[in-house]
Image (cartoon, helix red, strand yellow):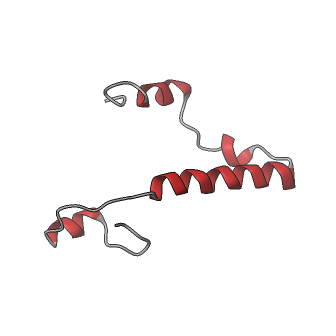
Amino acid sequence: MIWEGMPPPNVLEKLEVRRASTASGPARAAMTTTRRVAEELIKKGSYAAFTRGLISHIEANQLMTNRGGR
């Protein structure tokens, strides 16, 4: 399982690690971002936490296609 401080994938590959699982990491990252957005909106009345650096609607839709936008 991957955790903070792990070597990057290219280093793991050189160490002959065959599989590294992200487990619940991506889901927890999304939840953390959701919490930050809500806190900023409630405490500061600001939308910046979820308007800064967003992917476009087109990119988001492409991620949901069979080929993941590739």
Against 70, is 25 above or below?
below
Against 55, is 11 above or below?
below
**12 horizontally vs 65: left or right:** left
Q: Foreground: 4 or 31?
A: 31
**37 horizontally vs 9: left or right:** right
The residue lying at 39 percent from left, 58 percent from top is: 23
Q: Foreground: 49 or 35?
A: 35
How many numbered badges does the structure rendering display?
0
Task: Give percent across and percent down for residue 18.
Answer: 17, 62
Task: Give percent across and percent down for residue 30.
Answer: 56, 50
Task: Give percent across and percent down for residue 9.
Answer: 27, 63
The residue lying at 46 percent from left, 59 percent from top is: 25
Q: Foreground: 60 or 52?
A: 60
Residue that sits furthest to the bottom in the current view? 5
**45 horizontally vs 58: left or right:** right
Task: Give percent across and percent down for residue 34.
Answer: 65, 49
User: Which quadrant does the C terminus fall into?
Assistant: top left
User: Which quadrant does the N terminus fall into?
Assistant: bottom left
Against 2, is 40 above or below?
above
The residue lying at 42 percent from left, 31 percent from top is: 63
**67 horizontally vs 11: left or right:** right
The residue lying at 53 percent from left, 36 percent from top is: 55
